[in-house]
Image (cartoon, rainbow, N blue to C red):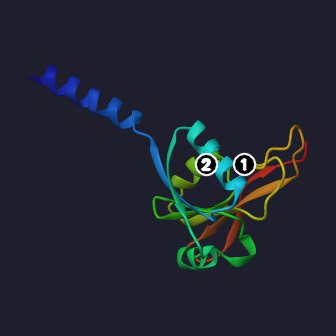
Amino acid sequence: MRRLLLIATLFAGFVQAAEPLTIDVHRDPSCGCCKAWIKHLEANGFEVHDHVEQDMAAVKTRLGVPHRLGSCHTGVIDGKFVEGHVPARDILALRQRDDLLGAAVPGMPAGSPGMEMGDRQQPYQVVGVTREGQEQVLADYPAR
């Protein structure tokens, strides 16, 4: 009986590990880079629920995205916002941080996921926002 229980527990762990992470992405209907960012997420194992919005400003306000950190699209995972072209690995790191409301890549920097332009990459940062409204750099991507 113990052996069956152990096998069932191990199998359940494997099934959970194989489940994709689900993220909701809110975007403008005419934005091409938003679709490219969605492809980046899907290529990295995310299941994306794509929401086409007519009023992205209202979505960002509702989710608590600071205006100065704005970009074109906004994701939501585990109740946290993901603003702009945040790399998939930084979204995974965000999920581990209970102290953060969300993370953002302000603007639309060339070379960030969804904004690929050959070998060109502008420097950019992934900025986290704490529950107290403080900002902190979570990742730094240099120019290439």
Residue drawn at point x = 52 percent, y = 64 percent: 80
Q: Which element is circle 2 on? A: helix
Which mark, by number, is residue 87?
none
Q: Which element is circle 1 on? A: loop
Q: The N terminus lies in which quarter of the figure?
A: top left
Point out residue 122 in the picture as x, y percentages from the top left corner. Answer: 88, 51
The residue labelled by disc 1 is 114
Residue type, label 1? Gly
Q: Is residue 144 left or right of residue 7?
A: right
Total labels drawn: 2
**92 over 28 or under it: above or below:** above
**30 over 70 or under it: above or below:** above
Q: Is residue 1 left or right of residue 84?
A: left
Q: Nearer the viewer, residue 5 or 48?
A: 48
The residue labelled by disc 2 is 38
Q: Residues within 10 Å of mark 2 (few under 14, many from 20)?
A: many
